[in-house]
Image (spheres, rainbow, N blue to C red):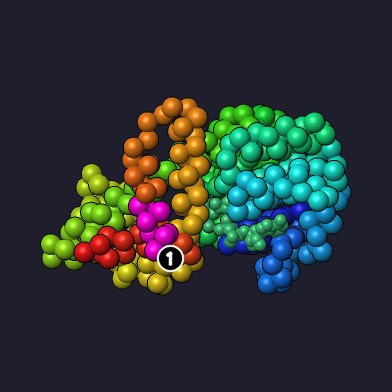
């Protein structure tokens, strides 16, 4: 069993750290939030007084932070950067969704000090983090992927090697751009059906068995009352925030611009989530986008 520092114990990181502890690893957890630290302690993690304390003498560091600036600040550019403290045989696994350029830059800064750093963003949401069934999408060297895999398997079910450093982040934003488009399309179709007198549950059942079937319809229906246990049935609390979907669609637009890839659908989805966020819905789950359609009428 390994000694693992876990930095960032939010909606995703909290349950992921808990699953590492449950698997028998010795987890040294840190977050800026005191309640998050208390929950980690309840879940069997040791808590550290700072990120710097957490990473001393560990085999792995896992980070689960909001965005690229947090990751680069922590490891490279901030006060007491962790790359000054981490042992050279330690592997850093960053599971945050961040831009690929930052991921590559941080990996290069680590490599200059002999420290391995891979991008390993996840898909599967808070439910997947709790159940230990996340999909990990790794960017890094083959040997680093092999080293990380047993740790990732304690938190996830499907572990993919997308390619070299940054490739995990590119694959992740391709997926989330598609998710944003699918959710917007699902909201649009359900709203039109409801406006024409259809029961959203009946329409969802029809489309799930027809060519419009997709992940949002299958497991994340945006209309309240259609499906139990989804954010739509608890006033869009918890889940995957509009703010984070908007961030990911922005990352997708950066990748699109850098590679001159046509992304008109991704761009439209970003505009829709931007409107919804601007109306004060940033902290709601992203399936609340259906309210944008309903409010528009
Ligand atoms: P969150 O805001 O719930 O958690 C982030 C945590 O990081 C917070 O607890 C915050 O206090 C902590 N933090 C920030 N800076 C820190 C620092 N310097 N040191 C220590 N702790 C620090 O966010 P989340 O929903 O857990 O998402 C984390 C990442 O995972 C994001 O990049 C997000 O895009 C991605 N993601 C989220 C989901 C989801 O469904 N929520 C799904 C897939 C990927």
* Stretch of the chain drawn in magenta: 272-279
**In magenta segment, residue 273:** yes
Identify the residue shown where x is 43% and y is 27%: 260
Task: Please tell me in which quadrant of the rendered image residue 290 appears.
Answer: bottom left
Q: Looking at the image, can residue 11 be seen? A: yes
Identify the residue shown where x is 71% and y is 62%: 31
Q: Secondary structure at mark 1?
A: helix
Identify the residue shown where x is 37% and y is 70%: 233
Task: Please tell me in which quadrant of the rendered image residue 118 appears.
Answer: top right
Mark 1 sits on what residue? 280
**In magenta segment, residue 281:** no
Magenta segment main secondary structure: helix
Identify the residue shown where x is 50% and y is 50%: 247
Judge whether 108 appears above or below 276 on screen.
above
User: Dividing the image into four equal quarters, which quarter contains ligand 1?
Assistant: bottom right
Q: Position of residue 232 (x, y in %)?
A: 37, 67
Dot 1, crowdedness within 10 Å: few (<14), some or many (≥20)?
A: few
Q: Is mark 1 within 8 Å of ligand 1?
A: no
What is the count of numbered marks?
1
Q: Nearer the viewer, residue 110 or 27?
A: 110
Q: Position of residue 101 (x, y in %)?
A: 61, 35
Q: Position of residue 76 (x, y in %)?
A: 76, 42
Judge whether 59 appears above or below 30 on screen.
above
């Amino acid at each position: 069993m390994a000694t693992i520092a876990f930095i960032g114990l939010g909606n995703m990181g909290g349950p992921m750290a808990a699953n590492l502890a449950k698997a028998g690893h010795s987890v040294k957890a840190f977050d800026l939030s005191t309640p998050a630290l208390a929950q980690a302690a309840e879940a069997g993690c040791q808590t550290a007084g700072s990120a710097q304390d957490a990473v001393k003498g560990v085999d792995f560091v896992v980070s689960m932070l909001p965005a690229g600036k947090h990751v680069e600040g922590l490891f490279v550019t901030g006060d007491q950067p962790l790359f000054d403290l981490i042992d050279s045989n330690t592997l850093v696994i960053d599971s945050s969704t961040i831009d690929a350029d930052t991921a590559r830059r941080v990996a290069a800064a680590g490599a200059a000090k002999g420290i391995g750093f891979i991008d390993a963003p996840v898909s599967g949401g808070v439910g997947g983090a709790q159940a230990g069934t996340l999909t990990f999408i790794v960017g890094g060297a083959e040997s680093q992927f092999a080293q990380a895999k047993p740790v990732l398997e304690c938190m996830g079910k499907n572990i993919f090697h997308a390619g070299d450093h940054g490739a995990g982040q590119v694959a992740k934003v391709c997926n989330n751009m598609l998710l944003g488009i699918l959710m917007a399309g699902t909201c649009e179709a359900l709203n039109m059906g409801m406006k024409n007198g259809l029961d959203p549950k009946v329409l969802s059942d029809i489309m799930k068995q027809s060519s419009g079937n997709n992940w949002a319809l299958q497991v994340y229906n945006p209309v309240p009352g259609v499906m139990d246990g989804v954010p739509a049935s608890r006033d869009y609390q918890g889940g995957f925030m509009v703010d984070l979907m908007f961030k990911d669609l922005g990352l997708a637009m950066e990748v699109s611009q850098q590679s001159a890839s046509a992304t008109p659908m991704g761009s439209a989805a970003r505009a829709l989530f931007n409107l919804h966020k601007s109306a004060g819905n940033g902290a709601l789950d992203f399936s609340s986008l259906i309210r944008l359609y309903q409010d528009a009428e």
